[in-house]
Image (cartoon, grey):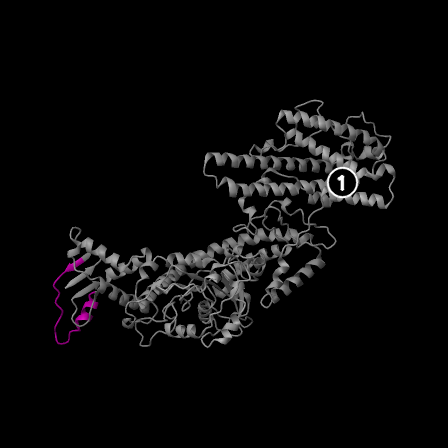
Amino acid sequence: MVIVDKSGVHRLEIRCCECPNAMSPDIQMFRHRFFPASFNRPKTVFTFRVLNDFLLDSLECGTSAMNYYSKLRRMTSSMFPHLVPDRYRELMRVARQWRQLKTMKWHGFGHRSDNPSTGELALFCPACPQPGINVLLSEDELLDDWKYTRSFVMDGNFKAEHLHPIKPFDEVWLSDGLGFMVGKDRYKMHLAEAADMVEKSSCNNHRAVNQANAARHKLESTGIGGVACARHGCFVPHSMVDFQKGERQMNMDYALCEASRHNMEGITRAVTFYDINCQYNKHFRVRVDRSRFLDMAPQLTIIPGIGLWHIHGHQDSCYVRHASNFIEGIGRIDGEIMETLWARLNLISPAARGMSSPHRKECLDYQMNDSNFCKMIRMKRTLCRKYKLARNGISESGKAFDRLDEAAPSHLKTEWLARERIAQSSRLNDPAAMDEYEINIKKAPSKKEIELRLLEEGNARNAAPSRRSVATWISTGLAIEEAQIALLIETQRLDIARQRDRLQGQIDGFARSALTHLGEGFDADDEPEDLNVDILDDLDDDPADFTETSHTWTNSPELTVIPLPSNLGVDRCRRCMAEDLIPLEMSLREGQANDALHNLRIYLCNKAILFRTTVRQAKSQALKTRAWSQVTSVQQAVSLHASIYTKTRKQMMKLEPGQDQLQKYKPLLREQLKISTAVGDPNARGQRNESLAWFWSVEVDLRGPDQSWNEECEFLLACHIPRLPDWTHAKFTKSIGCGQRHYEIDGGKK
């Protein structure tokens, strides 16, 4: 008799007991841990050890039966493996039977006479709420509570393709529909009756939509699709389907309906994440109502979502309508966990490509069952880790929300909460209601806009001749200060000489006109305190070098102090009867600060884009040199505008600013000017836990007439900047952290 063991293939003489009361030869072999290849007159047996080893190799390494048996033959005779008996076909047949027996034993059917029903030979997530299994309600609890919401993720995998079987009439089904793959008969009837609707995408050109009807005639199945729990990544039993063409709606409809029937009695809320949910979910209920083979509880509410990775391939409007960040009660979830599950399943897909249909589905069922088993045994560690992250997230997001909440007027908070409730309650019937969370930009006024307003106000009240052009005079002084700072940063000697000459003429003209606006009490020959210009020339220097005082030249125009009210001081302005110039300069200084911060943001974003598109893409030394030259040029602009803002804020401090101005225009620190390449993407992935520096949101008018606190700062000039948390967004972030903590510990009585 040929005995196939983990150590090799052996020929041994075996005699079975032939006593009158002896068991049959096959049972005797089972008792001795041998699995016979046939049951009447067995000539080949496989040890239990080799069968377990083959299944484990198949799970972890994707080893096919042919490769595994080839290894055994070479272990038996490394010189002449072709002389070892070929039991490859017997191994495939016995392995199928062994896999089936092990699965039935694990699921409690080893000593039962009844047969398993749909999906009963499959493990599922122990943490998702399942009434009657891990949910025991108290008297005052209902299953419509948000913590009993089931979350599903749907996706397709085109690596798990399958060739047409050679002998379909000779196939033997051992577990049709008992595991994760759906039963073939009912599924085929659904496909035969379902209408193949070709729907034009109203969003971007998604491949899953455009290639839904792409057929490949050499394949019986172009791939598989299905449903898993979105939070813990466990495949849902009896919810995996084969694709006949592309990723069609009729395939995913059947998978979702089967998933919604698995241990969900009484649950009224489910969230589904799908790459193209903005298109798929539009007429889902209509398709379910029209089909005889699609069944879903009418009280079950489906909330559509899109994963946080795929959402960036959609139109901007899809973000607030379908991103998980705006789904109430869902917690911290990305909706992309299905992509990680395919990687494990793809280990066995190449080996299963040419198998018979039942054998392939059994292998896929076994692989998915093992994936769920690995998730189950690690669930405690996973939940503890998520709980710790959620607890820390509550503290961080709570502080960010409290800062906004304390300053927001109470009547507006009441209004925002009402608008939020309307948006959340209307999102199912009208996804556009979620546009309430979209960005509304209100740009801070520039220096030119403020100058124009001041001139119009002066003309309207018939100001004195000495005050009619005072706004333009102060604005000219601010421009001279900016030119002085730019000259201090300049490095080319010829350019320095030319700019000094031009700047000196501007200063002389400005000083002469000062006599008109400052009155007789001002003496042009007086010298205020020395000019102290803050320079930010190299962000890579030591932090102590962030602010430098320039004393390079004496009697140079770049160091000349021009007679602005901020340089004269408040007391001296009062003595010169020019106190009314102080609020004018303060207003223009605000515009100058707004312009400096605006340009600073633009150049920082430009620098991020250069790193992503030019520096990282440079393959040669010449290209790298040019790329870094561009970065250096942008860095000089960053230094210039940072220095202008620092100087502007210093002058504003001399004009006795109000508390609102002190809160709005904060000191500019070195570390706040560091950028990430993610700032070039709107709603950049991986940035939802990051908070940007204060100057990214200064353009939101916190004191405007409409008190629009829920406006966020986003610049769409040459690039995009990530969103900053507004009141409603910060509230969501805080509630998401609390929801995650509550869900992981209390949801489903875990």
Q: Residue at position x 18%, y 51% from top?
A: 78
Identify the residue position indicated by label 1 in the image. Answer: 586
In this image, 616 relative to 664: left or right? left
In this image, 592 relative to 343: left or right? right
Frontmost residue, 730 versus 608: 608
Residue 218 appears in view: yes
Residue 533 appears in view: no
Secondary structure of the residue carrying numbered label 1: helix
The answer to if 21 sits in the magenta stretch is yes
Displayed quadrant of residue 3: bottom left
Frontmost residue, 608 versus 22: 608
Crowding at dot 1, Cα within 10 Å, few <14 / some 14-19 / many 20+, comes out as many
Q: Give the range drawn in magenta.
A: 9-32
Q: Where is residue 342 in the image (x, y as percent from the top left)?
A: 40, 58
Displayed quadrant of residue 500: top right
Q: Position of residue 246 (x, y in %)?
A: 43, 63
Q: Where is residue 473 in the image (x, y as percent from the top left)?
A: 79, 36
Which amino acid, mark 1? Answer: Met
In this image, 54 relative to 264: left or right? left
Frontmost residue, 704 versus 106: 704
Q: Residue at position x 70%, y 50% from top?
A: 702
The answer to if 143 sits in the magenta stretch is no
Q: How many labels does the image show?
A: 1
Q: Is residue 557 above or below residue 123?
A: above
Displayed quadrant of residue 87: bottom left
Q: Position of residue 265 (x, y in %)?
A: 48, 73
Q: In this view, does 286 lie above or below 639?
A: below
The quarter of the image holding the N terminus is bottom left
Residue lying at the far top of the rendered structure: 554
